[in-house]
Every structure is written in C-alpha cells, then in structure tokens.
Amino acid sequence: MKKKLPIILYSLFFIFCFTLAALILHHLISSRYLKIEYTPSSSEESSQNLDNPYRGFYQMGGYILSDKEKPKTATNWCKKNCTSNPYPLMLLEINLKNYSDSDISTNALTQLDKMLTVCTQAKKQVILRFLYDWDGKALSAEPSSLPQIKKHISRLSTVVNKHSDCVYILQGTFTGNNGEMNNSNYGDLNQIRQIIEELDNDISREIYLAVRTPAQLRGILRTSTPLSSSEAYSGTLASRLSLFNDGMLGSVYDLGTYGNTPLKSSSKPEEQGTRSDELLFQYKLCQYVPNGGEVTVDNEYNDLDNAISDLSQMHVSYLNSEHDEAVLNKWKNSTYTGSDTDVFSGCSGYDYISAHLGYHYVVQQSSIDFHSVLDDTAILYLTVANTGFSSAYTKFTTDLILTSKDTGKSEKVETTIDNRSIAGNDFSEFKLSLDVRSLKKGTYTVSLRMKDPYTKNYIHFANKGYEKSKTVPVGTLTLQ
C-alpha cells in the first residue's frame, strides 16, 4: 500500500500538470485566435482618359528672354499660357538668341525664375527646351563657341535647379533648328557629348535629360546596351538620359531618326539602325526613361493600327496636342476596334491613344494570407495592371487606407510599392504586410491611395466608377 501511494500521487500530479498545460495552451490559442474574412473588390476597367501628371498631351509655349522686358512681362505671359493650357504637361521653349555671344543677364534669369514659379503654382509639369533659334536659322543664331554654350548652361542651372520639382525633362542640347539638334554648328558627336555632360554636371539629378535619337544616346554613353533595371533611377547619366522625337511616325525613318542599315554586333553605338532595330531599342530603354514628342506628316506609319503598335513599343508617354493637325484629325476620325472584351472598342483612335499615353493603372485582384493562430501579420497580395503605353517615371507615395465601417475612422498603412516598377502593358504583384492584430474587431474597407509629392495630386486609377476618386477600392476585411 505504501508503494502504491507515491504512484497515485505522481499520477495525480501528472494529470494536474497536463490539465494545467492544456488550459494554458487553450487560453493562449483562444487569445491568439483571430478569424479573418476577405472579399476582393470588383476590378472592371474604365475607358476614361485619366487626369494624371507626367503623361498625356501637352501644350507648347515659347518665350524670348530679353533685357528689353521686365520680369513682370514674363510672369504675365506665363500666367496666360498656364491658364489656357488644359493639360498637366507644358513644353516651355526659352529662346536665348539675344545672348548668343554674351552672358545671360540677371534680368533674364529673373524672368525665367518668375515663369517657372508661375508653372509651379499652376502645378504644371514642364518639359523645358532652351534654344537659340526657332526660325530655321540655327547656323547663324547659335553662339560662336562651345564654351559659351557651357557658360549658359551653368548660369541657367542656378534657376532651373530651384524648380527641380516642376521641371520634369530638359530636352536637347540648346542647339539646332527649333532646339532639335539638327542643322547645327554643334552636331558632332563629341560636341553633343560635351554639352550633355555639362548638363549632367549642372542640372539637378531629379530632372531627366533628353536627346533627339537613339543613336545619339548610345554614342553619348558609348554603349549599345540599353539601360537596365539595376541602374534605373540611380542618378547616373545613363539613368536620366531619355529621348524626344519630333518626327514621330513621320516616315519609315521618322524623318531622320532612324537609318536603313540593320545593326550588327560590330556596329558602333552611334550608328543608326533600321526602324525595327530602333523600336526594339526604345522598347527596352524606355521602360525606365521617358519618350515623347510630336507626330508629323500624314502617312501609313501613323494610320491608327500602326500608330498604336509603335507608340506602345516605344513606350510613348507624351505628345504635342497641336502637331501634326492632319494626323491628330485622322485619329479623331478613326475608330478603334478591339476584342469583344476590350472596354475601348468603338472609341475614337484619338481617345484610345490619349488614354494610353503614359501609365494607366488598374487594381486587378487581391487576396489575403493569414493563419489565425500562428501569424502575427496578414499578407495582402495586390495585383496592379498598367494598360498604358509606358511606366510612370516619377515615384509616387502609395498607402493602404483601412476604414472602419463601424466608426468611419480611417488608418493609413504605408507601403513599399514603387509604382515605377509597373511597366506599360504589364502588371506587378505586390506583397504587403498588414498588422491585423492591432486592429479592433469589425469590418474594414481596404483602399489604395497614390499621391504625387510635387503636385500633391492624387493618382487616379482606371477602375470603373473611381476614375476621379482619391482612392481605389481593394477589398473588404472582416476581423472576428
């Protein structure tokens, strides 16, 4: 009997410990248990053209700097142009012909500063082009020496860099007819490279630079390899050197932009390739830097189907709204015919192209992964499509907004989304952490919000019914 007593006591103690452990485990599981239900929002795409920055058609304005004018004149001129410009983008041409062989005066710099201040106040994104000629007489209008152009760049940069949030792209090398780098005293590759390197040294790295042809770009950088994702947005010259094409779709050569000899592995970087060669080069390059300009000369290459194909392959994000009128009218009088499920089918060619210039975001689908006991945070998988021709080349701030249906209060969740990674005609899936255990139980609407740091404008998504909203719905989350 004495031997059995310890066994009984040990057994009772074991049962007690096991029961206590089970109770503790049950308590822990009960306290950790969080049931989640998630329903994704519908994702039908809209065919509306979205009012978003850094994309679309632009309006052009030109101003001649002169010591005969006062800064107030420049201010009033720019206010008038901004008011009459219905587009976020503006091509501002600044004619320096009065200073061709002299320093740019303080008065002239003040005029430029006043104009860019007006543009900033109007939330315009400026494509800036300095030139000495817009009458087709660049050979006689340009400075007599390359150092003079470099001095002008250095002097002007003090003003331009003050407005690096407003100035989106600086086009060209100050040279050529209409600043298009043609018929110039400074058209030699070495001269072009020197000017671009001066711009790279003096102009803020937040501003893109642009040259007229892919061959020029390759020659400047001394490589035939297009910009890679690993170098994109790094601040190097290669990562900020973009293209502008004012002969776009004008002929098989885009009016001198391309050549007629196929590129080979032995070709020098500065050699022009055929149209197909250069379209492929732009397809790779312009995933990371902007491409735009103006279409010209009514011909088969800007017939609607051909135009859409090439604009998409070149990742075009901006076009002149006024030139070439014959081409633009042809698009307006053409009808886009897509598939039965294409929301744009039946709209005009002009409306289709207008909506697809640049980026055109759509929240496509979402889901949540969460273990009710083991996980501390839920993972929200979010797919965002970009049905536009190109990426956005400016990084926006992107947040999730969780709004309680019970209280109406909203909570902002910062994300690591880099919208620049969403390529044109493609989609990206993002993996986002949600600290659901910090939320009170109840039902929440989950929305996505993008905002441009410069204009403070919200980025509109092409989800039907939310084309002008500050946020786009992602789904509904219930915590029980």
Image: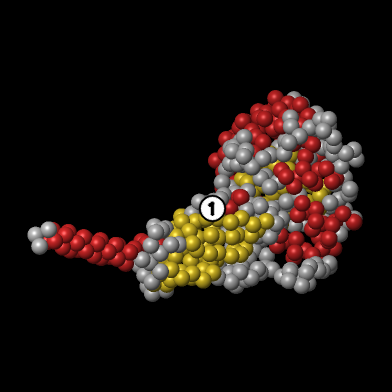
Q: Residue at image x 50%, y 63%?
A: 368
Q: Secondary structure at mark 1?
A: loop
* Coloring applied to the structure: secondary structure
Residue 151, located in which quarter of the rendered image? top right
| Percent of width and height locating residue 103 | 66, 29
Tell whether 274 sits left or right of 125: right
Q: Nearer the viewer, residue 78 or 4?
A: 4
Residue 155 in view of the camera:
no
Name the outermost residue toward the bottom.
406
Q: Using the image, determine if residue 178 lies above or below residue 379.
A: above
Q: Residue at image x 85%, y 45%?
A: 275
| Percent of width and height locating residue 396 | 55, 52
Residue 14 in view of the camera:
yes
Name the outermost residue toward the left.
2
| Amino acid type, callout 1 | Ile
Name the outermost residue toward the front.
1
Residue linked to disc 1: 417
Q: Nearer the viewer, residue 77 or 8?
A: 8
Q: Residue at image x 77%, y 54%?
A: 311
